[in-house]
Image (cartoon, grey):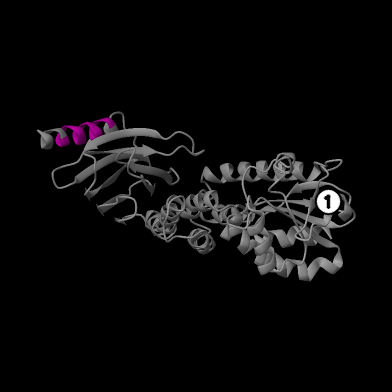
């Protein structure tokens, strides 16, 4: 019965694709074999040009040996588009770039998303390469993040290293394949940065979008994705421009004690460029930022850069020991006994940072050290 269902499904797909076919349409096939799935059918979806809700084109039941086949009729002058093979909600879909007349074959065993081979589409092969490099690291990051909340050998530094490996693979892939649609696919993933806020500013930026846009204008001049990229870049630039124009008249005043019980007002630093940094000594990520921040402080302190370092540690003794061991050269104060301080500055997660300019204007600060240095230099 299952084989009969396969035959009927495939015939229906062909019939639907053939009904009313115009002369300028060409036959396009996506076929192959997938085994080891917790599913007995596959769906073919076309991704919308604006990457919104995909359009489901059809479904086929897998044969006993995992074989499947889809047939499409696509206008011969149509620019390549993104399609997806979907097995179930529990299996990540395989994204393909399909051109008119393609004969694409997929062979997969086990994890359809990471363990597959594709032929008949060079762009689809590039997407497979990106998936394996980027999501292998992301999966390791997700595992580490899950186990950080229980007793395990994993550390936050290992989570940061896995996230950085993923983002580095993404940057390398986009930089190498700027003129390919696979680069556009790669641009849209921000999995690693969602786990590790310290990577903000390190990964994909609007600069990479512009580079891909310029390259695609040459390699795919008729592609609808060019207009989508142009619109996205224009919207992002507008948001950046609006953010740069927002000026806060002042920032809340806080006064906290250092390890020697000396009080320090934030307003005592008026006239300087100040990094207001909220952290906790039990976080390896925060401590990594502290180490990187030292070099920035040494380079720019004499030019008017200062740091107001606020700890959220619940144990004051642990905080004091961390400050002594790390030898903070800046103003390091204890906020663990004053929760209102964190409410004033809308600190919902750690680490969190703001830059206060010489005239008192305050804005969010990136946690990536390279991006942070650019922001500091711009304001000094």
Q: Secondary structure at mark 1?
A: helix
Where residue 17 sits: x, y (%)? 29, 34
In this rendering, position of residue 203 left or right of residue 270: left
Q: Which residues fall within the magenta stretch? A: 6-16
| Disc 1: which residue | 266
Q: Residue at x 57, y 55 (%)?
A: 212
Q: Nearer the viewer, residue 142 or 226?
A: 142
Q: Is residue 98 visible?
A: no
Q: Residues within 10 Å of mark 1 (few under 14, many from 20)?
A: some
In this rendering, position of residue 118 left or right of residue 378: left
Where residue 46 sits: x, y (%)? 39, 38
Residue farthest left in this picture: 1
Residue 13 inside the magenta-drawn segment: yes
Quadrant of the rendered structure where residue 72 is? top left
In this rendering, position of residue 171 left or right of residue 305: left
Residue 167 inside the magenta-drawn segment: no
């Amino acid at each position: 019965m299952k084989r009969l269902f396969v035959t009927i499904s495939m015939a229906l797909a062909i019939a639907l694709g053939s009904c009313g076919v115009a002369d300028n349409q060409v036959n396009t096939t996506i076929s192959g074999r997938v085994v080891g799935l917790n599913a007995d059918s596959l769906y073919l979806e076309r991704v919308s040009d604006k990457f919104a809700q995909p359009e489901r084109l059809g479904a086929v039941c897998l044969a006993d040996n995992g074989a499947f086949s889809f047939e499409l009729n696509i206008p011969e002058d149509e620019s390549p588009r993104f399609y997806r093979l979907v097995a179930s909600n529990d299996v990540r879909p395989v994204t393909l770039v399909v051109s008119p007349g393609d004969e694409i074959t997929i062979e997969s065993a086990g994890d359809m998303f990471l363990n597959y081979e594709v032929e008949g589409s060079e762009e689809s092969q590039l997407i497979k390469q990106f998936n394996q490099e980027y999501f292998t690291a992301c999966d390791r990051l997700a595992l580490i993040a899950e186990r950080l909340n229980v007793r395990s050998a994993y550390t936050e530094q290992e989570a940061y290293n896995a996230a950085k490996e993923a983002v580095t693979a993404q940057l390398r892939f986009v930089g190498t394949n700027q003129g390919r649609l696979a680069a556009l696919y790669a641009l849209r993933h921000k999995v690693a940065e969602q786990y590790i806020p310290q990577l903000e500013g390190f990964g994909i930026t609007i600069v990479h979008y512009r580079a891909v846009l310029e390259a695609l204008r040459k390699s795919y001049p008729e592609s609808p994705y060019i207009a989508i990229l142009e619109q996205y870049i224009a919207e992002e630039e507008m948001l950046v421009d609006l953010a740069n124009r927002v000026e806060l008249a002042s920032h809340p005043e806080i006064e906290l004690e250092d390890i020697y019980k000396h009080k320090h007002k934030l307003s005592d630093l008026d006239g300087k460029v100040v990094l207001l940094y909220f952290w906790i000594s039990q976080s390896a990520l925060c401590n990594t930022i502290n180490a990187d921040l030292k070099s920035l402080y040494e380079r720019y302190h004499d030019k008017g850069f200062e740091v107001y370092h606020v700890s959220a540690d619940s144990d004051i003794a642990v905080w004091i020991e961390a400050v002594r061991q790390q030898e903070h050269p800046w103003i390091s104060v204890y906020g663990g006994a004053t929760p209102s301080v964190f409410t004033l500055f809308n600190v919902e997660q750690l680490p969190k940072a703001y830059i206060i300019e010489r005239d008192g204007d305050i804005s969010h600060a990136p946690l990536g050290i390279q991006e942070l240095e650019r922001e500091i230099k711009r304001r000094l």
